[in-house]
Image (cartoon, grey):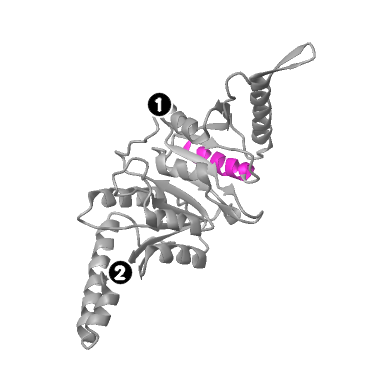
Amino acid sequence: MRRFRNILVYVEDNAHDIRCLDAAVRLAERNKAHLRVVTTVNELPPGRSTLSVGSTRLDIRSLIVGEKKRQLSQLIGGSLKSRGRIIADVLEGEPFIRIIQEVMWRKHDLLFTTAERRRSISEVLFGTTTMHLMRKCPCPVWVFKSQPAKGFLKILAPIDPDPSNPVNSELNDLILDLSFSLLRDGNGTLDILHAWSAPAEPILRVKAKSDSRAIANYVLQEKRMHQEWVNRATENYPVDAAGVGVHLLKGNPREVIPSFASKRKHDLIVMATVSRTGIPGFFIGNTAESVLQEVHCSVLTVKPKDFVSPVGLNG
């Protein structure tokens, strides 16, 4: 399935950039997609773009951009799997704004980037630029953390089915569409996960502890309802295929999703990042943000089709 046609890769000074580029190249080859690789430099303050050294006046901006282009060319040349032609460029300005504008200008349908290193050399977290991109970029954002062994991709697709919420239904379909399209014959597995809970169950157990049977029946009915929602959400997908599993786990998704991903050693989580607040800039829900900071694998985030980025084409 040719899912992606126009892929953008954003790289910076990161040890994972070469592996991220290799992964993006392989995906572009499978999809016969165009591939563009960019990096960014911050704009210089007014009056500080040149420097006089003796009788020579140096263009600082040109020197910085030139060095970035050299590094980018070296990175692309060092990617052993880069067999096709890759278009490369250096963008000037605030990284997340320029990247999102590039996505909108050139109509990219996937953004590939790396997680940012923080705290210690062994810890890779989603930093400020990455979070801005996941919140505000209109196309799916693939944040690369680790390379799956021998190309075997173990995918986790958390869904949140709710017949009363059309946005959730749309996002579930997008998550499942992407997840199944990324599966390759014999080279991947997919776990579809729904974390559920019975509203007010802890309070009810305290208030009505003498009637444990009624509470048990209430919880069972809630579980059956969520199971039916999952069945409806997945009925048009080959969930009985080899390597595909559907899981209904009780608990808070903030805890269930990272724990399940860690136990199953998933390489990629395909999940939605959208908030229901309606407040501009709050396009990532609290649950999604909490999960993203806990997981240790790559993440592919998606938004509704009618999502409008708060970043304008002109800044």
| The magenta segment | 17-33
Q: Give me the C-alpha separation between circle 2 and circle 1.
A: 42 Å
Mark 2 crowdedness (10 Å alpha carbons): few <14, some 14-19, many ≥20: some
Q: Give the prevailing secondary structure in the magenta stretch.
A: helix
Name the foreground residue: 212 vs 220.
212
Task: Using residue 71 as the reference point, say whether residue 252 is left or right of it.
Answer: left
The quadrant where residue 257 appears: bottom left
Task: Tell me which residue sits at (50%, 65%) in the image.
Answer: 264
Under mark 1, the amino acid is: Leu
Task: Tell which residue pokes out farthest to the top in this image.
Answer: 55
SS at mark 1 in the image? loop
Horizontal and vertical percent position of residue 173:
31, 50
- Please tell me which of labels 2 and 1 falls first in the chain: 2
Residue 210, above or below 248: below
Task: Tell which residue pokes out farthest to the right in this image.
Answer: 54
Horizontal and vertical percent position of residue 73:
66, 30
Name the foreground residue: 92 vs 4.
92
Residue 33 seen in the current view: no
Q: Which residue is mark 1?
A: 313
Residue 108 seen in the current view: yes
Name the foreground residue: 198 vs 110.
198
Q: Which residue is mark 2?
A: 197
Horizontal and vertical percent position of residue 79:
65, 38
Task: Using residue 236 as the reference point, say whether residue 271 is left or right of it.
Answer: right
Is residue 28 highlighted in magenta? yes
Is residue 76 highlighted in magenta? no
